Amino acid sequence: MAVISFDVGGTFVKYGLIERSNIVQKGKFKTDRHDKESFLSSLTAKIVDLSLLASIKGIGISFPGFIDSVNGVPILAGAITSINGVDIVNELKKRLTIDCPIYIENDANCAALAEKYNGAAIDINDFILLTLGTGVGGAIYYQNQTIKGHSYRAGELGMMLTDYGRFPNKTLHELASTSALISLYKGKYGLPPEAEIAGEEIFSLATDHKVKEIIREWCKYVAVAIFNSVVIFNPEKVLIGGGISQNPALYSYIKEALNTIPYWQDFMVPVQICKHYNDSGLWGAYILVENHLKQGECERNELS
């Protein structure tokens, strides 16, 4: 039996059919952010398609924002505002004929589950995960579990205010994300906001001294995010994820920026790139389902 995994992002919804820890099929489709019915219909259609390929034992959804994972509700769903407050689990069940459990969780928490399962955190119990994408995602994994907070807002590291003197109202989302790097690059080169360029492209242009300085300027905020997180939580390790983390040069820029912080030596912990890159959400959603099914099986065994 297989698990259907979704990794919902502001631009694309990635999906995977995972069976016995193997991705049998994966792909993506455009996220309909502004219409609830269209968004739910697109998920439903993909579930129906994938259920024709294998028997489905569960569906896992990695979702941005504040996620009430107990009741299956995105309290605030990031850029997908049409889903704010929607009981997405029951809404999907009403539209489906297959009978299987559905679980949702915050995307960064899913990435942390993936790295703990078979990634860069397999041998540790306390770590921080930062994802650099459209925004800055965060997850706190402490004493072998993700910390969610009393209202499911723990780990929202992208909301930190870190440069109050110059930018009193800008969060790390606007300063340390891949989107922030792209905005910085466009500003320096006078490009219009609608110009299309990816963060990975900017790194490929870093043979130019001016581009290298843009990356260094941006990376200072990434380093501040890491430093502040380490000072608060004292983890065993910090993991960096997101599509841009696939660039091998990123680590050296982060290391250089961290070493400019005079107190880093007092709090220093290993900083490592995530193993799963852009598939972390898919794997995390898969582990989410497997963990719930195992927990349910254990509870049934205890009652029998």
Image: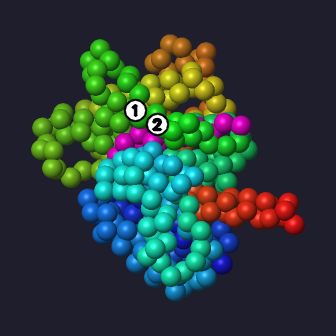
Task: Say which of 184 and 15 sits in front.
Answer: 15
Mark 2 to mark 1: distance in Å?
6 Å
Amino acid under label 2? Glu
Judged from the image, the secondary structure of the residue bearing numbered disc 2 is loop
User: Quick check: 208 above or below 226?
Assistant: below
Residue 142 highlighted magenta (yes or no): yes
Task: Say which of 124 and 83 sits in front.
Answer: 83
Q: Position of residue 183 (x, y in %)?
A: 24, 39
Is residue 57 visible in the rendered structure shown here? yes
Residue carrying label 2: 156
Is residue 26 visible in the rendered structure shown here? no
Number of on-image labels: 2
- Classed neighbour count for the residue bearing mark 1: other residues with Cα under 10 Å, few (<14), some (14–19), many (≥20): some
Residue 159: which numbered mark, if any? Answer: 1
Q: Position of residue 20 (x, y in %)?
A: 68, 72
Q: Position of residue 142 (x, y in %)?
A: 66, 36
- Classed neighbour count for the residue bearing mark 2: other residues with Cα under 10 Å, few (<14), some (14–19), many (≥20): some
Amino acid under label 1? Met
Quadrant holding the C terminus: bottom right
Residue, x 40% and y 57% (percent of image)?
A: 86
Judged from the image, the secondary structure of the residue bearing numbered disc 1 is helix
Residue, x 46% and y 33% (percent of image)?
A: 157
Query: Do tag 2 and tag 1 residues touch (Cβ < 8 Å)?
Result: yes
- Bounds of the magenta segment: 130-143
How is the model colour-coded? Answer: rainbow
Residue, x 30% and y 43% (percent of image)?
A: 179
Residue, x 46% and y 74% (percent of image)?
A: 94
Residue 131: which numbered mark, if any? Answer: none
Secondary structure mostly taken by the magenta-highlighted segment of the chain: strand
Quadrant holding the N terminus: bottom right
